[in-house]
Amino acid sequence: MKIYELFFLICWLAHGYCTSDIHIGYQVSLAIPTSYCKGFIGRAFLMETDHNQIGPNFRGGISVEANNDKYTCSLDVFLGDVKVWSSGHLSQFYTIDKCTLELTQYGDLLLKGGLDDRVGWKAGTSGQGVKRLNLLGTGNLVLVDAMNLIKWQSFNFPTNIMLWGQRLSSRTRLTSFPSNSSLSYSFEIQYDKIALYLYSGKSKYSYWEYTPLELDGLNITYVELTSNALEIFNNENRRIGRITSDKPEPLRFLALGNSTGNLGFYYYSSDKGKFEASYQALNTSCDLPLACKPYGICTFSEKCSCIRLIKRGDGLLSDCTENVRICGRNDSQMLELQGVTSVLRSNPYKVNVTKEICANLCLDNCTCVAALHFSYENDPAKPGECYVYGLARGVKQIERDGRLSYMVKVPKGTDQGHDKHSHWKKWIPFVVGVVDGVVLLLVLGGVGYYVIRKRRKSCVDTGHSN
């Protein structure tokens, strides 16, 4: 794929220097190619902060990017090469001909495009006395009046990044979106914890949580990113918890990864000339919610092994395919995977039920594709909690635990080709450590070869010495 990049520093071209503010009446346009060029990126940087800290400055400008056979127009803030805020994070503005940024005489900030100057995004500050658009040293993009009072700020509309000095209250969240997927990630501040969630349609599943030890019955009201930690405060402005960085270098931002959904703290490495992670919430790939494809299992070696299901007469049914939607006990069955669990969690669908009842609950639910039963005792036949899933993701291999039973829904008559008379009541064990087994065989084979060769060499040497 060819990548076309076109960058302008308009303020330098026009004035010989770059300021951090724009006044009412300002307007600038960026032309859009007449034909679609895959990978095209065009940017016009309009503002830049003063260089007063380690690493690159903040820059603000408008961007045109090729996306899904169309072009998007957005107002962006960058820290070096990292996009830390964008007007198009939640909703893209597609346009043709041109991308125009205007700070009107009435104080509203607009993004327009097309032959008819259609408005695709606006700050909504018309008539509030706005005089300037400022890019602050913190990376906060603000609209202010003549008294420097903030009427709008980008910090109130976070994307997937939280900057140093920025606060997030329980009413806000960070979001990120895996490419070519309808799923999304979210970093949320709740009354009693902060957590990472995977959203799938109307369902959400947590895959990481942090609960402060000093809640004392008070609620979390906001979090703030400082130079060395994410600080957690209650409604008395008292710090009740903190997640610290693993490096001494000052933090510049916190990010929720678009591809992985992992939460990381980032500092600028002067030696390498780039931003590097000093803390990550999830340290192994198997703890990531989308480490493997649907119906894939992350093994002990952190490799993905597909759940291979064979439907008699129809050949291969599942080889890390998309979720299979089946309804009713007459057409589907539940198959148990031994030695696996899911990193995804939600509130129990039902409590004080057996594994068999849990399986039936999933069979009767058309949106359910998998279920997890957690027994209160070390006996799967005993009652416990039942969790149902609308997607078969986040599955990883674990040591056998008699309390856990993870099951997937498949068409009736499906097995692995081992037992032609299997029934859904006879839980079929799955061998999920295929990759680990191959690796172990290779290692043992190599060791055996080395030992045999060494013995042969020893015998030859002994024969020569005689």
Image: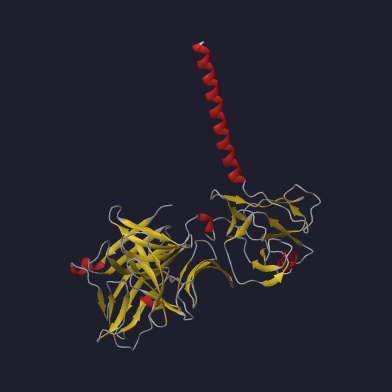
Which quarter of the figure has residue 89?
A: bottom left
User: Residue drawn 80% across and 49% down?
Assistant: 420
Image vertical order of residue 401 relative to residue 87, above or below: above
In the picture, measured across the screen, residue 52 lies left or right of residue 457, that is left
Name the foreground residue: 150 vs 281: 281
Image vertical order of residue 284 relative to residue 241, above or below: above
Q: Residue furthest right?
A: 421
Q: Residue furthest left?
A: 16
Q: State whether residue 97 appears in this view.
A: no
User: Residue drawn 47% across and 79% down?
Assistant: 216
User: Residue drawn 52% across and 15% down?
Assistant: 462
Image vertical order of residue 410 relative to residue 168, above or below: above
Which quarter of the figure has residue 385?
A: bottom right
Q: Position of residue 202 (x, y in %)?
A: 59, 73
Which quarter of the figure has residue 391?
A: bottom right
Q: Position of residue 18 (x, y in %)?
A: 22, 69
Image vertical order of residue 447 relative to residue 45, above or below: above
Q: Residue furthest top?
A: 466
Q: Position of residue 214 (x, y in %)?
A: 45, 75
Q: Position of residue 439 (x, y in %)?
A: 57, 41
